[in-house]
Amino acid sequence: MKKYLSPIIILAVFEAVAVTLWLTKDNLFYLFNFSYIGISVSLGVILFIRKNIYAIRLVQLLVGLYMLIYLGLICNENMQIEGFWYYLFTGVFEAATIHYAVAKIFGPLVFGRGWCGYACWTAMVLDFLPYKTPAGPRKKLGWVRYVTFAASLIFVSALFLAHVGNLERIMFWSFIIGNVLYYTVGIVLAFVFKDNRAFCKYICPITVFLKPMSYFSLIRVKCDKEKCISCGKCKRVCPMNVDVTDNSRTRENGTECILCMECVKNCPKKALD
Ligand code: SF4
Ligand code: SF4
Ligand code: SF4
């Protein structure tokens, strides 16, 4: 039973958020939304503990498709970064602002970049591509994320400053166009760099929030130095080039860990946990 403690805690945290938002905002949607995500993630963690090889893919599809198809296309909620700026500027704490607060700004203090490993609808598609382990070292292109971050902020600010009408419709179309762009650039980069996660490493603007917050993450993969034989396998299988044998918070690419547990599964000495 002890081994199922983490999915129980995850479900409890999501339920606490679900009930709190349902009661404070008097909207049943929040109860459904966060319960669904909590159940999906907990189910994935249970399957992972039971060594099911499809556990992570299942969670990615359950949460990713729900957010992309149901929230994005059916409910017309722009859950991309432009949607976050939009709701922030209108002063409304709902939809994208809640999503960002939970998954991408404060949540990473607890579960790091778990969002990137298990729930993101962009990575949900990119992870189907053939380059699960990067073919070479990281490129020095991380600065591009700050350009895309600034571009998204400038785009939405300009709409507000110019008093453009029908912003809701514009946000819906920016969600569609933004996703088409993300998928296209992500797939092209994956093939060019032979690295499924190249988009995450160099382009994604959301990492500007995710990286500093996940630096303090409570949940981290740690290495038992007594067991480690420095074989380097963990680094070779890591999709994000993290040096997981270094337990310090400043470890190489430490804020890039997406908690996919590939290193843990592949360590021949069971030194990672
Ligand atoms: S880095 Fe961006 S695109 Fe990649 S998984 Fe995280 S949120 Fe998604
Ligand atoms: S795979 Fe395991 S034994 Fe090998 S370097 Fe990594 S932690 Fe050490
Ligand atoms: S392989 Fe390990 S260090 Fe690399 S992203 Fe996955 S969990 Fe993090």
Image (spheres, rainbow, N blue to C red):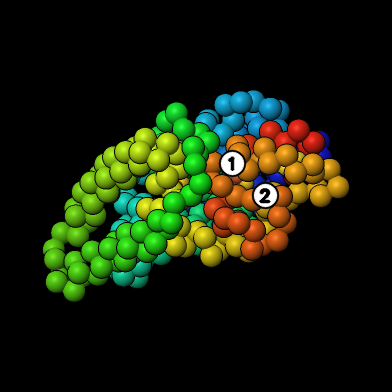
1 in relation to 107, above or below? above
**Is the residue marked by circle 2 packed among few (<14), some (14-19), or many (20+) residues within 10 Å?**
many
**Secondary structure state at the residue bearing disc 2:** loop
Percent coordinates x, y for residue 155 in the rendering: 23, 64
Which numbered disc flags the more N-terminal residue, 2 or 1?
Answer: 1
Report whether residue 98 is seen: no
Percent coordinates x, y for residue 245 in the rendering: 71, 50
**In the image shown, does 172 or 91 lie closer to the viewer?**
172
Number of the label disc, if any, that sits on residue 244: 2
Percent coordinates x, y for residue 11 in the rendering: 63, 45
The three-letter amino acid code for the residue at tag 2 is Val
Residue found at x 35% / y 70%: 91
Residue found at x 54% / y 41%: 239
Query: Mark 2 near ligand 3 (CB under 8 Å)?
Result: yes
Query: Mark 1 near ligand 3 (CB under 8 Å)?
Result: yes
The three-letter amino acid code for the residue at tag 1 is Cys
Q: Answer left or right for 186 relative to 45.
A: left
Q: How many marks?
A: 2
Q: Residue furthest right?
A: 226
Q: Work out which quarter of the rendered image holds the N terminus and state it.
A: top right
Q: Work out which quarter of the rendered image holds the C terminus and state it.
A: top right
Q: Answer left or right for 135 relative to 8.
A: left
Residue found at x 69% / y 33%: 266
Number of the label disc, if any, that sits on residue 238: 1
Report whether residue 244 is seen: yes
